[in-house]
Image: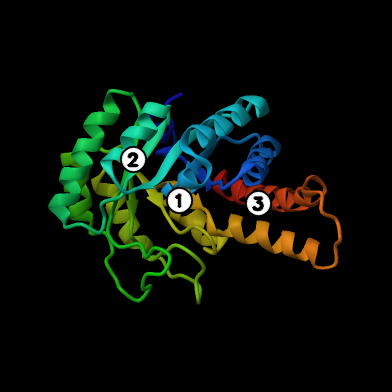
Amino acid sequence: MRLQDKYKELRNTPIALLATNFYNFETLEGVLQAAVQCKSPIILQLTRSSIEYMGLPMAFQMARTAINHHGVKAWIHLDHGDSYELVAQCLDEGFDSVMIDASEKPFFENISVTQKVVALARKYDACVEAELGYVAKLGQSTEKEGFTMPEEASRFVDETGVDALAVAIGTSHGFYKKEPRLDLERLSNIREVTNAALVLHGGSGVPHATLREAIGRGICKINLATEIKNIFMKTLKAKLENESEIDLRKVFPVAIDAVTMLVAEKLKVVNNK
């Protein structure tokens, strides 16, 4: 099933897809073990930095091979694609879905850039996600506000034809200094004026009850990245603190298991269990 078709299937349900970033074999394995345990579909995401770290063919083929090995339903997605060229490379490689993030550009330039990506992706029968509004990235101010306006979301989706739209309703990337307060009423208003699948970036650290309510109000995809990196590294550091073992094959499994536990917990939330 195409990802864009899965989004349509989820539209009027209390269920969403979890989209998890992976950074190496170990985090990929931890994520997919959780999907197997929960018998749940999942989206595997790669950013430019992860692609540059692992290499595009290596990262993609590792993910595709792991998906087939575990027998889970999963899609490979480019997260925060920052250029048409990167999107094109990922589509050529075989990605199921791509995100073009021109959200920091003026509204009409965001539309123009996104239109070009949508036209290209249609040739590959691939799903396209874009972003509208200000969702603070790592290192950016979380004090600045630039929430998605429903009327702009409606126009943006109509003029670009995107399948999914990441909306700014109060989340940010990275850890929160205080519990995020999401504008859920705004989310409902956006849901009323567009048929695009709505996406929540910055899912790490958002309370489960809030995530469930966001899904009930139209969110079809929730991104999880920071918590995966954090639990993997914290677990590994704790293991190594009083450990003389140098065989990484004996050290990494505890960190893989920690990722699996985290992702399994999040999968229960998005699947309304």
Residue ID for mark 1: 49
Residue at x-position 60% and y-position 51%: 266
Which label sits on residue 265?
3
Q: Residues within 10 Å of mark 3 (few under 14, many from 20)?
A: some
Q: Are marks 2 and 3 in contact (CB under 8 Å)?
A: no
Q: Are marks 1 and 3 in contact (CB under 8 Å)?
A: no
In this picture, residue 208 sits left or right of residue 183: right
Where residue 127 sits: x, y (%)?
35, 33
Where residue 167 sits: x, y (%)?
33, 55
Q: Which amino acid does the dot numbered 1 rest on?
A: Ser
Which element type, helix, strand or loop, lies under badge 1? helix
Q: Which amino acid does the dot numbered 2 rest on?
A: Leu
* Quarter location, residue 142: bottom left
Q: Nearer the viewer, residue 199 or 65?
A: 65
Q: Residue furthest left?
A: 108
Q: Residues within 10 Å of mark 2 (few under 14, many from 20)?
A: some
Q: Nearer the viewer, residue 109 or 166?
A: 109
Q: Nearer the viewer, residue 187 or 121?
A: 121
Which element type, helix, strand or loop, lies under badge 2? helix
Q: Is residue 181 visible?
A: yes
